[in-house]
Image (tube, grey):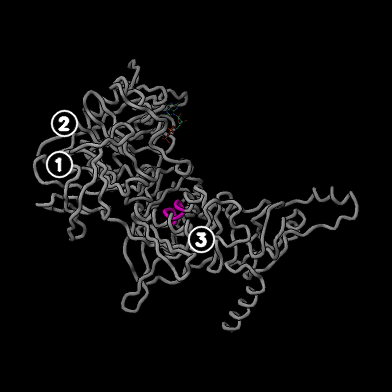
Amino acid sequence: MSKNEKIRNVAIIAHVDHGKTTLVDAMLKQSHIFRDNEQVVERVMDSGDLERERGITILSKNTAISYNGFKINLIDTPGHADFGGEVERVLRMADGVLLLVDSAEGVMPQTKFVLRKALENKLKPIVVINKIDRPDSRIDEVADEVLELFMELDADDEQLDFETVYTAAKAGIAKKNIHDDSKDLKPLMDTIIKEIPAPEGDFDKPLQMVITTLEADDYVGKIAIGRVQRGKIKSGEIVALMSNGETKKAKIGKVYTYDGLNRVETAEAEMGEIVALTGLTEGSIGDTVADFENPEALPGIRVDEPTLSMTFGVNTSPFAGKEGQFVTSRHIRDRLFKEAQTNVALRVEETDSADVFKVSGRGELHLSILIETMRREGYEMQIGKPEVVYKMIDGKKYEPIENLTVEVPQEYMGTAMESLGRRKAEMVNMTEIAGYMRINFLIPARGLIGFRSELLTSTRGNGIMNHVFHSYEPYKGDIPGRSRGSLVAFEQGTTTGYGIFNLQDRGIMFIEPNQQVYEGMIVGENSREMDIDINPCKQKHVTNMRSSSSDEAIRLVPPRIMSLEQALEYINEDELVEVTPSSIRLRKAILDRNTRGRLAKNSRKVSD
Ligand code: GDP
């Protein structure tokens, strides 16, 4: 074994807004003092508004900084542990981590899962306390909190002996001691070089590399990214592509390494480098790219099974095509199949209808992020009720069970337990850490639907959760769903304050005055079990001028506005969520009220 002394592979873990993007930007900007010809583009690592809003990073990206003849590969980590599989994968490329913490906010619970994984993988940590210029900074306290967290997460002695660097990323300054003078980030760079171990392995043995991430590129096709674990990889080389005991012959197109924000072509890359490869059209995540003559597989990467499905269909509402740009079945089909090439835990299938696709993924968040992303790209779709992926084993119905970890401040524990009880969760164990309860459960994947938003609301944003697939087990019995019917608009029109006012004692309204509605659109929740058709567009017969002013005096209860996740959890089997770039509407699958009425009558007869 030898070391690739010139390389450092470092993952960055940070809570959203703690300054990861600013820090990486500053490193890139200063690379002119480290080296001259670097091109700097603003805001690199962070790829979208969506990620920011939800406090997560979805796609992990690589950036490389040259410093004093060293190359530091910075690996972005998903800030959210719902992508547990992805976290594990990207951490496999790193030898160390930067834990970046805001000097006022301190460590946020959401980063714990990723940090725990990093510590379990024996990565060497460096703690970076950022925003030291903040007037409300609590630098010493935050440093203590970090140490406590490391102990809580069972860091080993070497990990507990971490170095701390203080930064003002915005000003591009780093210090080893808070009272030092500094003009740049060199103290941080030096610490990385000193503390993070260089990648270790054999340069001269046959090639081994595990595909960690895939990207789709419109020009060059599939790009496979990973770290060369052993030997060298050459452009144009014939390799063995090894997957689950099968070995195929494949040819590498080009080999790229990272330089700043760019990928640069290289003839050859050696052990320790992070590379992007073209040409491996059949490669999947977890496959080993190995020497053709002496193929030896590395342990694969477990990709979690999809456990939750939703239908994605062409929008058939009367408002279809008004708000979105991509609305046809062809558009949706192409987009979904393209996504499935790189989004590993995602499965896309055709259905009996050419206009409807079945999309299965790792849970509500996984699928709702795809829906949000498509929405922002200009797609319109209608989404069906989330269903778990059942399996029939020996004639019996089995369902996916997830291993759920919830962390809540003690005062919210009761509420969380109650909700999870309803959702058929069984507690496995419980530990208390500094005012927090960490509780492990086994829960049917069904029971998780809608739980995230409920947990966030009921704990005022202080609860966190994470789940990984556990097993398939015999069906656990019914989980009570919603017991109330829908209030359904009975014709197309514009809602009025008067119309809504007259209906609001029937239940909870989802709409405001002056909103466009259509026949079959769900505008509220009935306080009873049945669906009823109502007219929220009713006009008041204006007999004189004064009555219109009295109209303004009516008191409307604020409507319930649902997020995408809430809407998906809410709908019944015969309902859909209409998603467009500007709206989320709930609707009956069958819009025509006569047809719906007839079907309802028939089904009542059957059950009689
Ligand atoms: P990310 O979500 O972790 O990538 O965070 P950003 O890099 O986008 O930073 C979030 C916010 O914190 C931005 O408004 C930054 O300007 C601000 N910020 C970043 N670094 C510093 C710093 O050192 N001091 C102060 N005061 N603000 C900072």
Disc 1: which residue? 232
Which quadrant holds the N terminus? top left
Of pointers 3 and 2, the one earlier in the residue sequence: 2
Residue type at mark 3 is: Ile
Residue 603 in sight from this viewpoint: yes
User: Is the distance from the Cβ of mark 3 to the nearest ligand 1 atom less than 8 Å?
Assistant: no
Q: Nearer the viewer, mark 3 or mark 1?
A: 1
> Foreground residue, 100 or 404?
100
Image position, residue 422 (x, y; %): 47, 63
- Distance from label 3 to label 2 (Cα)? 51 Å
Residue 190, picture quadrant = top left
Q: Is residue 420 left or right of residue 291?
A: right
> Foreground residue, 230 or 279?
279
Residue type at mark 2 is: Glu
Image position, residue 22 (x, y; %): 40, 30
- Please give the name of the residue rendered at 54% of the width and 51% of the height, measured from the top-left corner: 325
Vertical placement of 260 versus 504: above or below? above
Disc 2: which residue? 5
- Which residues fall within the magenta stretch? 364-370
- Please give the name of the residue rendered at 48% of the width and 57% of the height, measured from the top-left corner: 450
> Foreground residue, 189 or 159?
189
Secondary element at image label 1: strand
Residue type at mark 1 is: Lys
Mark 2 surroundings within 10 Å by alpha-carbon count, few (fewer than 14), some (14 through 19), many (20 or more): some
- Distance from label 3 to label 1 (Cα)? 47 Å
Disc 3: which residue? 383
> Quick check: is 246 in the magenta stretch?
no
Q: Magenta-highlighted stretch: main secondary structure?
A: helix
Q: Nearer the viewer, mark 2 or mark 1?
A: 1
